[in-house]
Image: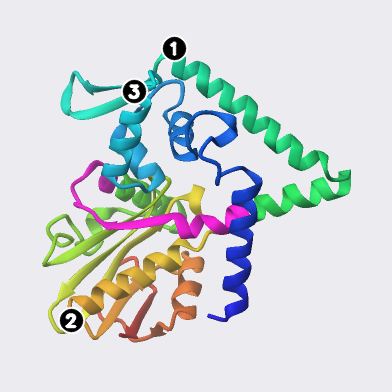
Amino acid sequence: MHTHPIQQVRSFNRTVAEGIGALDERFLGRARPMGESRLLWEIGIDGVEVRALRARLGLDSGYISRTLRALEKQGFVVVETCDDDRRVRKARLTKAGLAERAELDRRSDSVASHILESLNEQQRATLVAAMAEVERLLQPSLVRMEIEDPTSDDARACFDKYFAELDERFEAGFDPALSLSADAQDLTPPAGELIIARLHGSVAGCVALKFHKKAPAELKRMWVSSSARGLGIARQLLAEAERHARMAGARAIRLETNRSLTEAINLYRRSGYVEVDAFNDEPYAHHWFEKKL
């Protein structure tokens, strides 16, 4: 990658950090750094499970625990175990914590107003539109991908939404029972893998692989949530699947797809997949692709 784009991103990051006061140990004029204040805001009015908080912010458990302890000492947070599952911890704001969160909101609004007040009306519109675009373009860098148990709640939710979308888009509908197998056993290592993409802790998409030793790996169940489309997540999932296929020793990767899935077909072609003769009897397939790894 060229040096100039990297330097521009770094310059932008420094400007934003300075503009919002992230460098000050007394963020927004309060007696704590930005990390603690951000956690107060993320815990929210209704509280949140600690594991969900960790996943949403992409932070390690040690940092989350230390920061929550600091907020507990200040009297702003209480961390409790859930009655129905003692392994699950939930953080909630105390009365003082709710008041502090409201004050942080007020001060954050003031910082935002100060930024906008220094501009004329046209400049404000330009800045706000640019910020919205920058926020959208930054989303892909926040995506986290992990190998998932195909029997987990998140995995089942992905499959249900994937099947529902295929049923809606295919000309004759879709019945999973008629399609070639890609069940939990097929997608559990070493037979295969399920990769789930998460954005801010929520499921954004998935892709699955079936391994066949030195024979080409099979790409299955490529899906991106409608709320996360347009962010390049499908391309990231495809690249991650290819990486895992290489690690498993596959020299090529294959897939079949339905002609109704035009976006997927275009992605495969752009990513170096070449259309080949049918290599299986998948009843819903119209196109078969392969890519050398």
Q: Position of residue 179 (x, y in %)?
A: 25, 61
- Is residue 92 rendered to the left or right of residue 107? left
Disc 3 residue type (three-letter):
Lys
Q: Residue at x 64, y 25 (%)?
A: 106
**Residue 277 badge:** none
**Residue 95 badge:** 1
Q: In the rendered view of the protein, which quadrant contains the C terminus?
A: bottom left
Among numbered discs 2 and 1, the one appearing first in the sequence: 1
- Is residue 5 rendered to the left or right of residue 164? right
What span is colored magenta in the figure?
A: 134-156
Q: Is residue 30 visible?
A: yes
Disc 1 residue type (three-letter):
Lys
Residue 237 found in image quarter = bottom left
Among numbered discs 3 and 1, the one appearing first in the sequence: 3
Question: In 3D space, how far apart are the residues under numbered discs 2 and 1 (Cα atoms)?
Answer: 56 Å
Q: Nearer the viewer, mark 2 or mark 1?
A: 1
Vertical relation: 236 (above or below) 88 = below
Quickly name the residue at label 2. Answer: 249
Q: Is residue 282 visible?
A: no
Disc 2 residue type (three-letter):
Gly
Quickly name the residue at label 3. Answer: 73
**Depth check: 203 or 81 in front?**
81
Q: Are marks 3 and 1 in contact (CB under 8 Å)?
A: no
Q: Residues within 10 Å of mark 1 (few under 14, many from 20)?
A: few
